[in-house]
Image (spheres, helix red, strand yellow):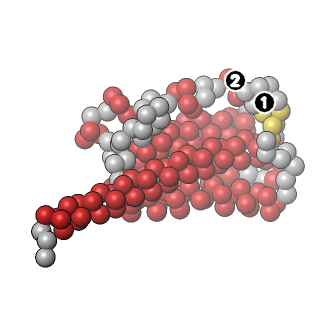
Amino acid sequence: MTKQEFNQSDLQALFDNAEYLVDEAEALKYVIDSVPYDEVPPGDYSIYDKLRLIDHAQNRYYRPITEKIFSETRRISLTEFNHFRDTFEDSTQLEDDEKNVQKVLSKIIKHRAALLTIFKKLARIDWEKNLKDERGREITLYVFAATMIENERKLLKEIADLVLIYQNEQIHQREINKRVVDRNNPK
């Protein structure tokens, strides 16, 4: 579990880590169209749906809860909210022409910028506000936000791993095709 006590440099590190998602989304814009991002690995989500899940989580779960912490005088419990994984719908029902990965990446960037604006407006003492996690334990807003980033990093690593696998498969297939051509056209 993430530590409960933190200082200003910990907060700055949290902001930097939250901004990392923007950098990753920007970088993915350049490579994502070269891989089969809508291919669904067995028992998992496609790259496209993992990106949609990141955006859904930050826009429909983490941000509203963060805002609610400050609009309520009572302590918020995460059990009052549907978890983002429970409310997420994968893209299997979408038509192919509705699947726009570049648009999803742009939404991630836009929504993260809005969340970062909220984060940076909060005073250090605000980050110490408590809420109850899914198990009824008290955690700070800082821990809640750090958990969001930890979950995103895990998904981003899974996405990066899939991109590498797909790129390596493409390289391997080109090598096979070259050997076949070379074998069929001896010099």
Residue 107 visible, this angle: no
Left or right of 24? Residue 120 is right
Query: What amino acid is found at the position of numbered circle 1 in the picture?
Result: Lys
Q: Which residue is drawn at 53% across and 43% down?
A: 54
Left or right of 125? Residue 83 is left
Residue 118 percent across, percent down from the top left: 65, 50
Indicate the quadrant containing the C terminus: top left, top right, bottom left or bottom right: bottom left
Comparing 81 with 29, the one in front is: 29
Query: What amino acid is found at the position of numbered circle 2 in the picture?
Result: Thr
Q: In this view, does 36 lie above or below 178?
A: above
Query: Residue 132 has which mark?
Result: 1
Q: To which residue does mark 2 refer?
A: 79
Q: Distance between the residues labelled 2 and 1?
A: 8 Å
Q: Do the residues labelled 2 and 1 touch (CB within 8 Å)?
A: yes
Q: In which quarter of the image is residue 164?
A: bottom left
Sequence order check, earlier mark of 2 and 1: 2
Q: Which residue is drawn at 55% across and 26% down?
A: 86
Residue furthest to the top: 80
